[in-house]
Image (tube, grey):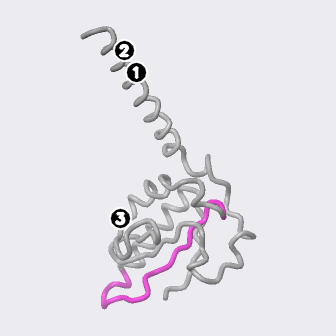
Amino acid sequence: MSVLKKGLLGLIVAHFAAFSSIAWTQTSQPLPKRIAKADPTRYRAVQDGKDWKNPYLVVRPNGIELVGTTPPGSVIPVEKVKEVLEGLPTSSWPYGLVVAVQDIGLISDGDLPRIQATRQRLLRLLKELGITADPWPSA
């Protein structure tokens, strides 16, 4: 391999490594290290879900929908919520570390116990992550 090709290959590898390292650093930092604590004075007056600017989580029997992040109606398992929230940019957290949490409004027979269990797992996870859960009434 010629010196020019080796140099070009080395430059490409170094460039890729630098960008990978930047991306990894931005998303690998825990939320409390890059997002301020929840500031209720910034969101206390919000009365309508369409005006909420932080992550909005809907608890469903089979998982969590992140409104505006996951496709409408699709869910992720509670265990993936941490990964998704940590992957959000800092600009997604103008109120600090707080998320709106709402149970799905329409349920079928037998869904309520599953929703309650999913909510409990979610709230436990949010507490571990240092994220405040702002409860919203179901629709």
Marks 1 and 3: in contact by CB < 8 Å?
Answer: no
Q: Which mark is residue 11?
A: 1
Nearer to us: label 2 or label 3:
2
The residue drawn where x is 60% and y is 74% is 52
In this view of the protein, which residue sits in the foreground, 80 or 72? 72
Other residues around mark 3 within 10 Å, as few (<14) / some (14–19) / many (≥20): few
Q: Badge 2 local density, few (<14 within 10 Å), some, or many (20+)? A: few
- Which residue bears the numbered disc 2? 7
Of badges 3 and 1, the one in the foreground is 1
Q: Secondary structure at mark 1?
A: helix
Amino acid beneath label 2:
Gly
The amino acid marked with disc number 3 is Pro
Label whose residue precedes the other's in the sequence (3 or 1): 1
Of labels 2 and 3, earlier in sequence is 2
Residue 110 point in image, percent of width and height: 31, 87
Q: Secondary structure at mark 3?
A: loop
Above or below: residue 56 compared with residue 138: above
x and y percentages locating residue 117 in the rendered image: 40, 74
Whether residue 75 is in magenta: the answer is no
Relative depth, front residue between 9 and 136: 9
